[in-house]
Amino acid sequence: MNFNSTTLLSDLTAIVNEHISYAKQLLELKEEKLQWRAQENSWSVLECLEHLNLYARYYNDEIDTKMKRSNLPFSDTFKSGFLGNKFANDMLPKEQMKTMNTFKSKNPIHSDLNKETVILDFINLQESLLELLKVAATKNLKLKIKTTLPLLKLRLGDTFRFVINHNIRHIEQAKRVLENQ
């Protein structure tokens, strides 16, 4: 799949801004509401956000490091890789969505979390992601980025799509948790 690089980065930036706005709204809710879980082994709103924080810490650092080292010239067109496109699209929420297992190190279930720490971390990490998207506007989006899966690298454009679609997935999950209370 081919994308206009500037349009892709602009669309992703808009989504990240929506997520930051949503997180700021969550700061207005009571801690108990954000800690509530539907079942013993389902995530609370705070656990959904902390899961995203755990991934953001890895990907933000990896993307930043690789972009600083890259000398590839900017290209107006970004061609998504087969696996990158599949992984990014698989992250998007859809009806009859299958649950996915997460790495134990990225599973915050039953962690001792507090509202301000988790939400403010989320906002800060998303603001850092916005800065990375700005820098990416001068980079070639085919730059390779290591994923959390051993030996797998995705193109920078696909990595952004994957990470932000993963955020969409869990923001939607957090919204469902709040709706089901």
Image: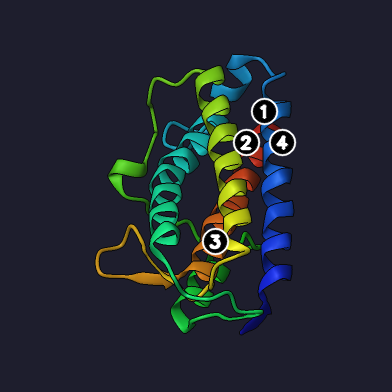
- Mark on residue 141? none
Q: Which of marks 4 and 3 is nearer the N terminus?
A: 4
Q: Name the residue under label 2.
A: 177
State which tag comes first along the sequence, 1 or 3.
3
Q: Which of marks 4 and 1 is in front?
A: 4
Q: What element carries label 1?
A: loop
Instruction: Give SS at disc 2.
Output: helix
Q: Are marks 1 and 3 in contact (CB under 8 Å)?
A: no
Residue 88 quadrant: bottom right
Q: Which amino acid does label 4 sit on?
A: Tyr
Tell me which amino acid carries mark 2.
Val
Q: Would residue 36 be visible to someone looking at this image?
A: no
Residue 164 placement, left or right of 54: right
Kind of residue indicated by mark 3: Phe
CA–CA distance in space, label 2 to label 4: 14 Å
Looking at the image, is mark 4 or mark 3 nearer the viewer? 3
- Eyeballing the image, is 54 above or below 150? above
User: Relative to the observer, which residue lies in front, 181 or 130?
Assistant: 130
Q: Name above or below for residue 86 compared with residue 104.
A: below
Q: State yes or no: discs 2 and 1 in contact (Cβ < 8 Å).
A: yes
**SS at mark 4 in the image:** helix
Question: Mark 3 — residue?
Answer: 160
Residue drawn at the location 59% of the way across and 24% of the way down: 34
Q: Residue 73 location, x and y as percent? A: 53, 76
Residue at 49% over, 64% down: 159
Say if residue 111 shows up in the picture: yes
**Residue under numbered circle 4:** 22
